């Protein structure tokens, strides 16, 4: 059983930064690709960034490129999302998701159905 727990959300002013963390536990937790998605009311959950099990495959949505950085600490089974230059349109609930993979798999997984394990989400609110 894989369990995910997000932390680090909160209110921030436009131009500011937040550092989200997703702790992944369970037998296959460290053997998973992990992604961040976000969702605002009335909209579909959208892909933000992903990192492969090995860390060799990192992908970003266009909205995140140049501002967000995804990374993982394998020893702590934690994946991070550093978000800089935040904008009001980044306001959303941010979810992390995991997909067990083999070590050599650096595939770009970006759809909701690619991931079978989800956290409860953390709210990010960016004020102008």
Image (cartoon, rainbow, N blue to C red):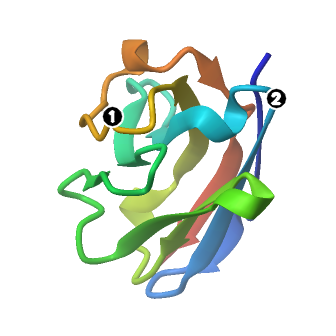
Residue at the spot x=71%, y=48% of the render?
122
Q: Give left or right: position of 45 versus 120.
A: left
Where residue 86 appears, as percent x and y from the top left, is: 43, 75
Where residue 19 appears, as percent x and y from the top left, is: 63, 73
Q: Quadrant of the N terminus?
A: top right
For mark 1, what is the residue? 105
Q: Is residue 85 above or below residue 58?
A: below
Q: Is residue 84 or residue 99 the one in the foreground? A: 99
Name the secondary structure under disc 2.
loop
Q: Is residue 90 above or below residue 29?
A: below
- Please tell me in which quadrant of the rendered image residue 56 appears: bottom left
Where residue 76 appears, as percent x and y from the top left, is: 78, 60
Decide: few, some or many residues near mark 2? Use Cα within 10 Å; few <14, some 14-19, many ≥20: few
Q: Which mark is residue 26?
A: 2
- The mark lying in front, picked from 1 and 2, is 1
Residue at the spot x=78%, y=26% of the render?
27
Where residue 124 appears, as percent x and y from the top left, is: 62, 58
Taking the view exactly as shown, the residue that stands out farthest to the left is 62
Q: Give left or right: position of 12 versus 120.
A: left
Q: Is residue 77 or residue 104 the one in the foreground? A: 104
Q: Is residue 98 or residue 100 the one in the foreground? A: 100
**How many marks are shown on the rendered structure?**
2
Q: Is residue 60 above or below residue 52?
A: below
Residue at the spot x=55%, y=82% of the render?
17
């Amino acid at each position: 059983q894989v369990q995910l727990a997000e932390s680090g959300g909160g209110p921030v002013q436009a131009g500011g930064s937040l550092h989200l963390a997703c702790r992944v536990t369970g037998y296959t937790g460290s053997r998973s690709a992990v992604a961040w998605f976000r969702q605002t009311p009335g909209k579909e959950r959208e892909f933000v960034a992903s990192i492969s099990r090995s860390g060799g495959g990192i992908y970003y949505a266009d909205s995140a490129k140049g501002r967000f950085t995804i990374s993982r600490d394998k020893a702590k089974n934690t994946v991070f999302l550093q978000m800089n230059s935040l904008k009001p349109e980044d306001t959303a609930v941010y979810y992390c998701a995991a997909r067990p993979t083999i070590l050599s798999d650096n595939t770009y997984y970006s759809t909701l159905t690619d991931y079978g394990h989800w956290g409860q989400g953390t709210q990010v609110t960016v004020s102008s």
